[in-house]
Amino acid sequence: MYTLWKRELVRFVRDRQRLFGAIGQPLLFWLLVGSGLDASFLPAGYSQGMSYLEYIYPGTLMLILLFTAIFSTISVVEDRREGFMQSVLVAPIPRTSLVLGKVLGGTTMAVLEGMLFLIFAFRLGIPLSVQALVSTVGLLFLIALGLTGLGFATAWQMESTAGFHAIMNLFLLPMWLLSGAFFPPSGVPAWLGWMMRVNPLTYGMTGLRRVLYMEAPFAVGDLPPLEICVTITALFALVMLGVSVVVVDRREPGRGR
């Protein structure tokens, strides 16, 4: 597990294109969209002085986790094609170690990149105390663990990187949009509101807003309690890990049952 975890970190750091894409694209999105829509945005229930650049900041933080999950788990498809994954499968180690090594490697990278992006929180004037900072990093870990687990379970069954990107974009981007990252849940149509409620990323997004504004809870309006958000996010991560283990046990990469 440690060897696979370390291998993921080394590969990701050496591949500067992936490193830049995972944080550069969300950063560009945040600056362009946040600045462009600032004049026409007034979130219901939030602090009246909050700009759209500040509102979408937690969503961009989650977007970095999402992109890193995609870029890190795509190595599963590449490892199968190069024959590395087959050699790991015949090694005398539990399949759980394989899953945890790959998923924790991607999770670690996602959290580290998210921590780099936290620098902009001080620029926006978000009142981050030590407790809020530690809580934010802990929640980033849970969200990244769930997203990377989902990416691993998907990549294990893919035959090509193009197919993997298509499937991940089909599921993950709508999940991100419906998490409250791009627009608040208040005022949306009833059917869209229900989709946001059943979306597990909604609670990760809400939890991020809660911990980032732990020192100023009035700034984020009427959101679900932090305890509920953390519980659902942790369950999502555990379920995705369980699904990944089941998929590995039932199917070899690139083959049938």
Image: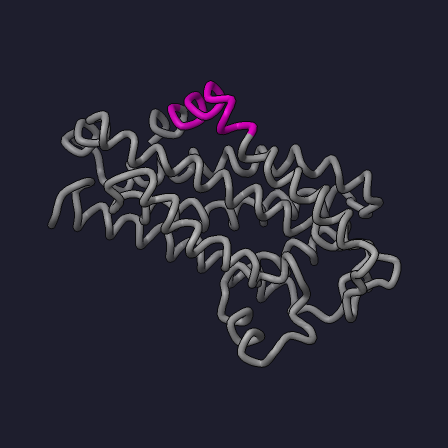
Q: Give how far across and how far down residue 160 sits, in percent.
A: 28, 39
Q: How is the image coloured?
A: one colour
Q: Give how far across and how far down residue 83 sits, in percent.
A: 19, 26
Magenta highlight on residue 8: yes
Give the mark count: 0
Q: Nearer the viewer, residue 246 or 79?
A: 79
Question: Where is the N terminus found, in terms of image quarters?
Answer: top left
Q: Give how far across and how far down residue 159 sits, in percent.
A: 24, 41
Instruction: Judge whether 249 appears above or below 71 on screen.
Output: below
Q: State the residue at coordinates (50%, 53%).
A: 173
Furthest residue to the left?
Answer: 257
Magenta highlight on residue 187: no
Q: State the residue at coordinates (34%, 40%).
A: 162
Instruction: Judge whether 51 appears above or below 106 on screen.
Output: below
- Relative side of 122 to 242, left or right: right
Q: State the residue at coordinates (52%, 50%).
A: 143
- Relative side of 199 to 184, left or right: left
Instruction: Judge whether 178 appears above or below 15 on screen.
Output: below
Magenta residues, dominant SS class: helix
| Residue 42, quarter of picture | bottom right
Q: Which residues are magenta?
A: 7-20
